[in-house]
Image (tube, rainbow, N blue to C red):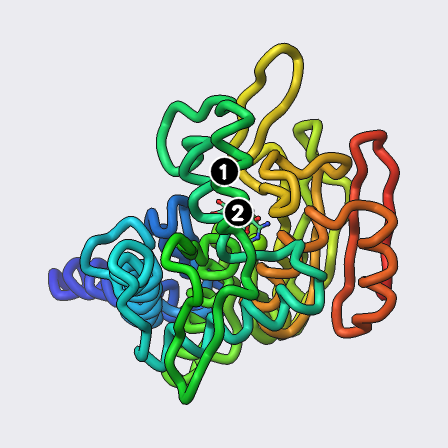
Amino acid sequence: MPRKVFIIPAVIVFILVVALVHANQNTDALQSRTRFLMDTYCTIKIPGGTEVLDVIDTAFDRMAEVQRTFDSLDPESPIHAFNDENVTITNPEIVALIKTALEVGDESGGAFDITVFPLVNLWGFFGDSPAVPDREKIDELLNAVDYRHLSIKAGTLVKDDARVKIDLGGIAKGYAIREAVAVLKKAGITSALIDAGGEIYALGTNKGKPWKIGIRDPRGEGTVGVLELTDCTVATSGDYERYFEKDGKRYHHILDPKTGYSAEGITSVTVVTDDPAVADAWSTALFVLGKEKGRELMERNKFLKVLMITQDGEFISSNM
Ligand code: ADP
Ligand code: MG
């Protein structure tokens, strides 16, 4: 019976095809893509089949759009025109985020201040070779650092001092994550992990279990703890992300708007809350505020879960 000879390979091929199709639709799989955005590697993971990869790309495209809109250094950005030519900002998306930034500015007593731009620039933190500037230059620029020079009038951002320049680097990444989450939800995705280097959003669950996220040890390789999160964000600001050392002292990109120098006392602040933009701004704000004032504010703002690690290795946590 020569026909059997053909039937057996045909059955094997059929089984193989079924297995391959099944593997492709395997709901246990975690689809993942990474793109370099907002100065860091961003990864989005979604449980499910490969059909979700297109949605991931759409979410990244939206993040890239946010990055362009809020890039103070991009000559095309309304923020650049506001900074250099005093052109008021009417773009509702930008004005809305600035409103949030000003609220955190107010609530943090000016620790979060988007008018630090000239100082961040002076220190060279936008470039590759930051250095300690002259104190006179810092003091001169400090005169135009105060978010109270900004106001929103009938949906338009204005400043009362032409020297004032803004930088949304302390909040824009969180906002980009918020927008990526919106894209995923709109596409019907109910579970995902969005990791944008220092800030992570956990959407839904990972196959029924909360997403597990490690908190990095600011002075070591490992983690200092693991958070289990569902439908919230975790943002960490640390002095290890962008820094240099000079005469045994560490200088990093989170500046104290009162002194013009890198904020001292804290090595990392982790904030957990619903809104990624708010988490981003508060992690920066609490970093500047430090141990005592930070403790006061975390207790007043119950919607923030906070873990603060000091330079002495002390852990301060609230509402966790
Ligand atoms: P990262 O974006 O690297 O995770 P942060 O969210 O803490 O770090 O934000 C740091 C960025 O925010 C800096 O690069 C700078 O552009 C800006 N920034 C620095 N100090 C302040 C401050 N006191 N208030 C608001 N923005 C700040
Ligand atoms: Mg931040």
Q: Where in the figure is residue 174, as x and y percent of width and height?
A: 51, 63
Q: Where in the figure is residue 267, as x and y percent of width and height?
A: 71, 36
One can see residue 139 in this view: yes
Q: Is mark 2 within 8 Å of ligand 1?
A: no
Direction from residue 284 to residue 107 in the image, left or right: right
Q: Residue furthest left?
A: 2
Q: Quadrant of the N terminus?
A: bottom left
Please tell me whether mark 2 sits on a helix, a strand or a loop: loop
Above or below 144: residue 154: below
Three-letter amino acid code at the position of disc 1 = Glu
Alpha-carbon neighbours of circle 2 within 10 Å: few (<14), some, or many (≥20)?
A: few
Above or below 77: residue 73: above
Q: Where in the figure is residue 260, as x and y percent of width and height?
A: 58, 38
| Residue beneath disc 1 | 140
- Viewer-closest of 121 and 4: 121
| Numbered label attached to residue 143 | 2
Q: Residue furthest bottom?
A: 154
Q: Where in the figure is residue 304, as x and y percent of width and height?
A: 75, 67
The quarter of the rendering in which ligand 2 is drawn is bottom right
Residue beneath the point at 49% across and 55% down: 115
Alpha-carbon neighbours of circle 1 within 10 Å: few (<14), some, or many (≥20)?
A: few
Q: Are marks 2 and 1 in contact (CB under 8 Å)?
A: yes
Q: Quadrant of the C terminus?
A: bottom right
Residue beneath the point at 48% across and 41% down: 141
One can see residue 51 in this view: no
Measure the C-alpha gap from mark 2 to mark 1. Answer: 6 Å
Please tell me whether mark 1 sits on a helix, a strand or a loop: helix
Residue beneath the point at 79% across and 31% down: 311
Direction from residue 140 to residue 280 in the image, left or right: right
